[in-house]
Image (cartoon, rainbow, N blue to C red):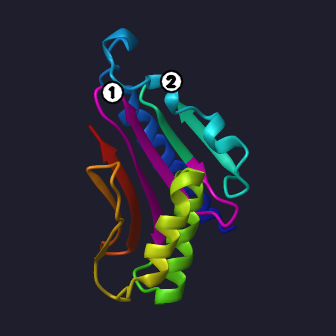
Amino acid sequence: MKVGKILRILAAISIIVWLNACSISQQKDSDCVFDPGYFTIARYEANSLTEYIHWIDQSMEAVIITPSSELVRIKHWACNHIGLEATMYLEGTYFSETQLKQKLNMLARICIEHNEIEVVLKEISRANIPTRSDYDIIIPTNIYSEFYAAIERSISVTILKIKYYRD
């Protein structure tokens, strides 16, 4: 792995940790509809797609580095609502449709539970993902009010997201 890439990953982790230190703490567990203890580091520890995991208990957030050096940030929430938003950062803005699908599949296998993974992988495989523009994949569900995968591009980074939310 290149030294510059390692420094960028460490800088990103430092920023995420600092932002979380500034975040507001969770409500008391007794006031919650959903169990705030539902999301823990144990969810990711046995996953072969996670090489490094930093868990921030107060904000229920995981910062992960994959074996192929992608940076993944997963923000969880569980109290009056339950959900997660997983974000993978890829250096560069041009990737083939196959590469984008492979990275979205990797992100899904890191953050989505077993009972939902097949639906997500099926929708990703069916999508006609453009190679140069942003794109959303809506995941059909009767459980979540919002469930999607997305590709966003900035000046030099491609951002992959998977998000689900239930109130």
Locate the C terminus and report the quarter of the image it occupies: top left
Seen in the picture, residue 1 relative to 31 is either above or below; the reply is below
Is 46 situated left or right of 98 in this image? Answer: right
Q: Is residue 128 above or below residue 12?
A: below
| Residues packed near mark 2 inside 10 Å, few (<14), some (14 to 19) or many (20 plus) | few
Q: Could you tell me which residue is drawn at 41 percent across and 66 percent down?
A: 160
Q: Which residue is mark 1?
A: 22
Percent x, y of residue 28:
35, 11
Residue at screen point 28% across, 78% down = 134
- Helix, strand or loop at label 1? It is loop
Q: Let me know if residue 162 is in the magenta part.
A: no
Whole-percent x and y of residue 151? 35, 72
Q: Please rate how many residues cluster around mark 1, counting C-alpha atoms within 10 Å: few if below 14, some from 14 to 19, many from 20.
A: few
Residue type for callout 2: Gly
Q: Is residue 35 left or right of residue 145?
A: right
The answer, for residue 53, to whether it is visible in the render is yes
Describe residue 118's horizontal placement relative to residue 139 as left or right: right
Residue 90 vertical position relative to residue 50 in the rendered view, above or below: below
Circle 2 — which element? helix
71 magenta-colored: yes
Q: Where does the image place residue 50, in percent across and percent down from the top left?
A: 67, 53
